[in-house]
Image (cartoon, coloured by chain):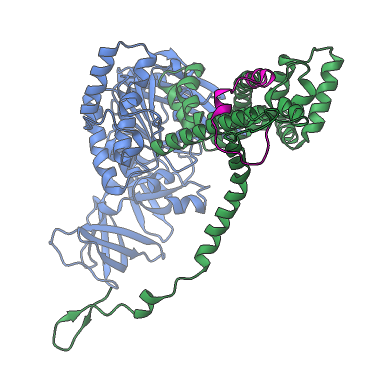
Chain colours: A green, B blue
């Protein structure tokens, strides 16, 4: 701020214009935040209902969900394993998610590295592979599920855990690849050259330099694969056979009546998801 | 200037000759090394010896092939043809992680997920050096680069200058046969760069490792190097000690790239054992020591050169002396720069000659419009082959 000389020889800061401090707060600045909170409410409301009803008392008849509030109870958390089919379906889903996530993360990460590393000239069919990845993401799941069932029947492959893993890996790889590739796009190749230069062979370079640096992308891809696998219904319904994962079981049960334990499992899965999200947020905050 | 100083083989000599004349061992030898990218050659039949313990620079404008040469020595690029010897061993197609060479990258390429200590220890750990020894050597090298107590810092918390020292430490700690430096100063500001040049040179003499330094900055190369080559279009244009190459450039390109030069086109008029006479386009005649004519000049057209600081400027009444070359002209621009005066003197032909005169308070500085006599000793005159394809883009870069 410039200083204005006053007649008596002293200097004085010019007055800050009144208008600035008295300007009315404009309503415009509330529009976007309000809008955002409304959208969030829209997203969270169904989850809140599920969480709330996992604590709802059932007062009469069969132990099924009713949507009248009968009072708070922890009964369903205490009796979480009382519905036999549900518990085994839940554990099947957990095992399935872990196995398919590990496999699809490894395959998808390597694919992403290959796609980023090699120029079109050295990698024939690179463009085709990229198109197929896109198709894999864009294709309706009902098509994939139906065609996988056809394939498994043709090859006379018994429907069960194996076919579920094959199906889940198949639809997760593309998501992992896309996520890891985004991370690799900004990767400084000279870091790998520096590792070679310092005596690290390609394997050691990958383990000590490349992998740690793309790890955030790999973990994000893995989380995506995990989430996709846990709640997949359409494909699983086609290829599950006698091994029924959690979503398929819930769908079947909802036609006769949903036991409240379903909400308990749903709440637990949601909480684990939140824990993962907070953890990754914490890690990225600590790094920056 | 002597032509064949011990460590300064001329361009025309083959590596074998260099070896026999020098007696010192070559750390790196390039034999007919060529690198072709997409049908354009980046490095074209390069022959070069870098001697043990030398600070050697590859100097040239961008795209001259200096970085490609360095990358081939590091093993990060395969030559299209030719041979690379490192300490007497053929390493042409050896993987980079098997070569006893370390590099300071232009971007430093420090590992962002590791702290300073782990960055420096990276190479030693790959060689399975035992823990106590790693600790000792990392500590010592941090002392040398003057960053003790930085071991546990994250590399992205360091300033540009500090990162550069860590990159240097990470390479030096392995005590390689040869250290390659790829424009390591380009990201530093001018003041820091100056300071690091002096420091780098002193570190080099302390550790005694051969340095091969790539730069486009001629001042940097001259300040630090024992010897340097000037490269252009993948070929060597000049090689020798900085003084040798500066005082006795062999091509027009070198004369312009390394410092400032006044170059005047002319025709060889008379050739004698010690002095050759060249007649300029405007009729004036200059003497050039015959030994300083570029080797193999058969054509009669040459460019006669003299460095601006070698020229004395005097009022035109003075008479010329026979041991000096003289030219008459008129001062067009006179600029006071503090340490001296810079003049642009217009020749009768219309060409300008640049003159630097030091501010030692001796004589009255001529003013623009004054008729002056320029003179300089014959031995400070050189002649170069005109570089025919010196395109304008390059000119502006010089």
- State the image coordinates of residue B41 (x, y, percent, origin top left): 57, 34
Q: Is residue B101 above or below residue A69?
A: above
* Left or right of residue A7, residue B309 in this image: right
Task: In this rendered view, identify the residue nearer to me: B333 or B59.
Answer: B59
* Left or right of residue A70, residue A136 in this image: right
- State the image coordinates of residue B18 (x, y, percent, origin top left): 36, 22
* Left or right of residue A218, residue B345 in this image: left
Tell me if residue B116 can be seen. Answer: yes
Identify the residue shown where x is 80% and y is 32%. Answer: A142
Rendering quarter of residue A23: bottom left
Rendering quarter of residue B203: top left
* Left or right of residue A123, residue B2 in this image: left
Q: Is residue B182 above or below residue A94?
A: below
Rendering quarter of residue B281: bottom left
Q: Quadrant of the N terminus of chain B?
A: top left
Residue that extends furthest to the bottom in the rendered view of this protein: A7
User: What's drawn in magenta, residue-wise?
Assistant: A65-91
- State the image coordinates of residue B98 (x, y, percent, origin top left): 44, 15
Identify the residue shown where x is 39% and y is 31%. Answer: B110
- State the image coordinates of residue B327 (x, y, percent, origin top left): 31, 60
């Amino acid at each position: 701020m410039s200083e204005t000389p006053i007649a008596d020889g002293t200097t004085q800061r010019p007055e800050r214009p009144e208008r600035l401090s008295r300007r009315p707060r404009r309503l415009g600045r509330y529009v976007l935040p309000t809008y955002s909170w409304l959208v969030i409410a829209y997203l969270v409301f169904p989850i809140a209902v599920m969480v709330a009803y996992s604590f709802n008392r059932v007062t009469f008849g069969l132990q099924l969900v009713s949507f009248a509030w009968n009072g708070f109870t922890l009964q369903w958390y205490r009796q979480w394993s009382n519905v036999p089919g549900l518990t085994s379906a839940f554990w099947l889903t957990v095992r399935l998610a872990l196995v398919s996530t590990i496999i699809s993360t490894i395959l998808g990460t390597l694919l992403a590295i290959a796609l980023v590393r090699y120029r079109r000239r050295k990698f024939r069919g690179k463009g085709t592979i990229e198109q197929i990845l896109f198709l894999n993401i864009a294709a309706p799941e009902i098509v994939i599920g139906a065609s996988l069932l056809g394939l498994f029947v043709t090859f006379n492959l018994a429907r069960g855990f194996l076919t579920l893993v094959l199906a889940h890996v198949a639809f997760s790889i593309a998501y992992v690849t896309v996520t890891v590739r985004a991370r690799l796009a900004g990767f400084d190749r000279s870091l790998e050259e520096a590792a070679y230069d310092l005596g690290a062979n390609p394997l050691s370079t990958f383990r000590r330099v490349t992998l740690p640096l793309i790890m955030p992308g790999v973990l994000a891809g893995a989380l995506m694969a995990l989430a996709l696998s846990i709640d997949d219904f359409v494909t699983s319904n086609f290829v599950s056979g006698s091994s029924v994962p959690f979503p398929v079981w819930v769908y079947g049960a909802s036609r006769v009546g949903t036991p409240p334990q379903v909400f308990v499992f749903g709440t637990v899965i949601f909480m684990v998801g939140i824990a993962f999200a907070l953890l990754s947020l914490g890690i990225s905050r600590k790094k920056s | 200037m002597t032509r064949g100083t011990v460590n300064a083989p001329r361009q025309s000599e083959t590596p074998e000759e260099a070896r026999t004349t020098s007696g010192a061992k070559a750390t790196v030898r390039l034999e007919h090394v060529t690198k072709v990218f997409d049908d354009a050659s980046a490095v074209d039949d390069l022959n070069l010896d870098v001697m043990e313990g030398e600070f050697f620079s590859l100097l040239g404008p961008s795209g001259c092939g200096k970085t490609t040469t360095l990358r081939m020595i590091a093993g990060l690029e395969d030559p299209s043809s030719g041979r690379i010897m490192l300490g007497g061993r053929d390493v042409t197609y050896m993987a980079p992680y098997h070569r006893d060479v370390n590099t300071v990258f232009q971007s430093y390429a420090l590992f962002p997920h590791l702290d300073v200590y782990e960055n420096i220890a990276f190479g030693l750990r790959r060689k399975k050096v035992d823990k106590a020894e790693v600790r000792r050597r990392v500590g010592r090298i941090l002392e040398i680069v003057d960053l003790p107590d930085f071991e546990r810092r994250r590399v992205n918390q360091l300033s540009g200058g500090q990162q550069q020292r860590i990159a240097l430490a990470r390479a030096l700690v392995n005590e390689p046969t040869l250290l390659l430096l790829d424009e390591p100063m380009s990201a530093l500001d001018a003041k820091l760069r100056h300071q690091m040049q002096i420091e780098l040179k002193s570190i080099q003499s302390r550790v005694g490792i051969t340095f091969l330094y790539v730069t486009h900055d001629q001042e940097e190369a001259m300040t630090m190097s024992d010897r340097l080559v000037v490269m252009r279009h993948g070929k060597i244009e000049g090689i020798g000690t900085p003084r040798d190459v500066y005082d006795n450039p062999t091509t027009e390109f070198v004369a312009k790239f390394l410092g400032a030069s006044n170059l005047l086109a002319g025709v060889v008029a008379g050739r004698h054992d010690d002095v050759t006479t060249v007649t300029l386009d405007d009729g004036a005649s200059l003497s050039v020591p015959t030994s300083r004519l570029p080797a193999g000049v058969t054509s009669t057209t040459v460019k006669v050169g003299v460095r601006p600081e070698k020229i004395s400027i005097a009022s035109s009444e003075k008479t010329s002396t026979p041991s000096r070359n003289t030219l008459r002209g008129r001062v067009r621009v006179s600029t006071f720069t503090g340490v001296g005066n810079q003049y642009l003197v217009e020749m009768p032909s219309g060409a300008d000659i640049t003159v630097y005169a030091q501010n030692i308070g001796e004589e009255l500085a001529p003013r623009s419009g004054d008729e002056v006599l320029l003179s300089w000793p014959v031995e400070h005159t050189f002649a170069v082959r005109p570089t025919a394809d010196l395109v304008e883009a390059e000119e502006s870069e010089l």
